[in-house]
């Protein structure tokens, strides 16, 4: 196993079996140098299907001359204009919050890259509509941080419950979270890669 991340997380026998059963995860990094656009896209995609989110985001971007929702231009759009893209009133407020934040606070890679993962979480969650899970997804898929463990992700928890049933059976709430963190600590400093495999793994019924 030439990949140091895989070699490390495979020291966990359960993860080794899971990796053997699972195709290598594809890594998409469409917004590698554009945290602002990634945050806008994450808001649009909340609580709707991927297909619907993609269609709405395309229509949203087409509202702007260069197909890019620059913060100042976004804030000049009327509610009716933004609604025409298929956005809800709540998501419009959240998109405007991202724009307002970006005009007052730098969110480019040069500013964020020196920060720790937790510092970035605390820096961005004051934006309305942006919670810890959203920032963790950005850390993993936009900033390519190697050691993120998104424990609040439902799929991650469900897959860990299946894979580590002997350790997690009957646990709920804080005791469950404690055990899941303990399991994931063995994957440091490559918890992002382990999480990618958990997402892609298809447990047998």
Image (cartoon, helix red, strand yellow):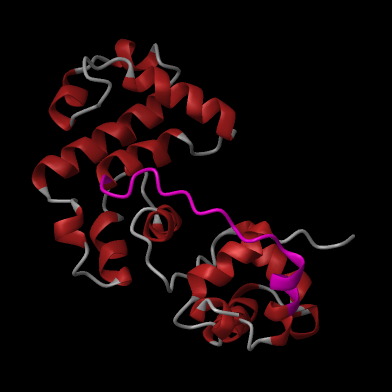
Residue 111 lies in the magenta-colored region: no
150 or 29: nearer the eye?
29
Residue drawn 57% across the image and 59% down it: 153
Residue drawn 40% across the image and 17% down it: 59
23 or 192: nearer the eye?
23
Chain part drawn in magenta: 17-34
Q: Is residue 178 above or below residue 86?
A: below
Picture quarter with the C terminus: bottom right
Q: Position of residue 204 (x, y in %)?
A: 87, 62
Q: Is residue 179 visible?
A: yes
Q: Position of residue 4 (x, y in %)?
A: 50, 81
Q: Is residue 45 above or below residue 190?
A: above
15 or 125: nearer the eye?
15
Residue 30 lies in the magenta-colored region: yes
Q: Quadrant of residue 187?
A: bottom right
Q: Is residue 88 visible?
A: no
Relative to 155, 187 lies left or right:
left
Q: Kindly report the secondary structure that dominates the magenta region of the rendered protein.
A: loop
Relative to 73, 48 lies left or right:
right
Q: Is residue 171 above or below residue 198?
A: below
Q: Quadrant of residue 68?
A: top left
Residue drawn 42% across the image and 55% down it: 141
């Amino acid at each position: 196993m030439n990949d140091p991340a895989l070699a490390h997380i495979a020291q966990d026998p359960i993860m080794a079996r899971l990796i053997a059963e699972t195709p290598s995860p594809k890594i998409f990094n469409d917004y590698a140098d554009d945290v602002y656009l990634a945050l806008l896209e994450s808001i649009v995609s909340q609580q709707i299907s991927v297909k619907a989110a993609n269609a709405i985001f395309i229509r949203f971007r087409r509202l702007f001359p260069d197909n890019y929702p620059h913060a100042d231009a976004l804030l000049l759009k009327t509610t009716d204009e933004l609604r025409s893209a298929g956005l809800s009133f709540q998501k419009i407020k959240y998109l405007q919050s991202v724009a307002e934040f970006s005009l007052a606070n730098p969110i480019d890679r040069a500013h964020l890259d020196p920060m720790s993962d937790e510092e970035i979480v605390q820096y961005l969650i004051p934006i309305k509509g942006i919670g810890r899970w959203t920032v963790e997804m950005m850390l993993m898929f936009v900033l390519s941080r190697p050691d993120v463990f998104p424990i609040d992700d439902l799929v991650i928890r469900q897959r860990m419950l299946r894979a580590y049933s002997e350790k997690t059976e009957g646990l709920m709430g804080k005791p469950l979270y404690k055990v899941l963190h303990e399991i994931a600590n063995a994957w440091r400093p490559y918890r992002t890669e382990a999480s990618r495999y958990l997402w892609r793994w298809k447990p047998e019924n």
